[in-house]
Image (spheres, helix red, strand yellow):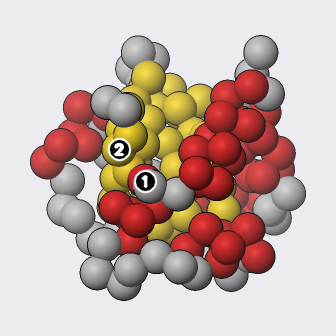
């Protein structure tokens, strides 16, 4: 059995959403960690840097950034597609390689590291 694990920041981001929306977002997360390499790419993307791969899943109007974890999936961020934060990260990215551009953006990785530090 695997778990979906939220860090402090992603848990707070989810908790700020209405309960029915939380359930809707989680119900779209219907795959196993070992399936990540063979999933239909609609809604999925990945960001790689220094050998580390984060996955992005679009669920409704949200982007969920996560990675594989020994116990399942570790959720780093849950961002609405129309937030200022999300806009700032994506506004200067090339349209043909959104995730590749995101991987090279220092601010994106700062967001991920901020979430990791909150776990300590």
The answer to which of marks 2 and 1 sits earlier in the sequence is 2
Quadrant location, the C terminus: top right
- Find residue 40 and report its image quarter: bottom left
Above or below, 33 against 29 in this view is above
Which residue position is annotated with label 1?
Answer: 103
Residue 106 left/right relative to 58: right
Residue 79 percent across, percent down from the top left: 66, 62
The numbered mark at residue 82 is: none
Q: Mark 1: which secondary structure?
A: helix
* Picture quadrant where residue 18 is located: bottom right
Q: Residues within 10 Å of mark 1 (few under 14, many from 20)?
A: some
Frontmost residue, 85 versus 15: 85
- Which residue in the structure is indicated by mark 2? 48
Regarding residue 47, the answer to whether it shows in the image is yes
- Say if mark 2 contacts mark 1, CB within 8 Å: yes
Q: Nearer the viewer, residue 88 or 74?
A: 88
Tell me where residue 7 appears, x and y as whole percent.
70, 31
Relative to 72, is 116 on the left or the right? right
Q: Position of residue 50 (x, y in %)?
A: 37, 32
Residue at point 74% right, 76% down?
83
Where 7 sits versus 11, above or below?
A: above
Residue at 55% from the left image edge and 64% from the top image edge = 63
What residue sits 38% from the left and 40% below the top? 49
Quadrant for the N terminus, please: top left
Q: Give the structural element (helix, strand or loop) at label 2.
A: strand
Q: Position of residue 116 (x, y in %)?
A: 67, 28
Image position of 94 with respect to 12: above or below: below
Name the residue rendered at 34%, 61% in the picture.
100
């Amino acid at each position: 059995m695997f778990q979906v694990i939220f860090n402090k920041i992603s848990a707070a981001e989810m908790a700020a959403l209405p309960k029915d929306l939380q359930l809707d977002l989680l119900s779209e997360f219907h795959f196993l960690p070992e399936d990540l390499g063979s999933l239909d790419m609609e809604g999925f993307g990945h960001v790689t840097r220094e050998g580390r791969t984060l996955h992005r899943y679009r669920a409704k109007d949200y982007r969920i950034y996560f990675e594989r974890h020994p116990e399942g999936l570790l959720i780093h961020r849950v961002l609405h597609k129309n937030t200022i934060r999300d806009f700032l990260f994506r506004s200067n990215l090339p349209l043909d390689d959104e995730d590749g551009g995101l991987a090279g953006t220092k601010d994106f990785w700062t967001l991920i590291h901020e979430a990791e530090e909150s776990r300590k």
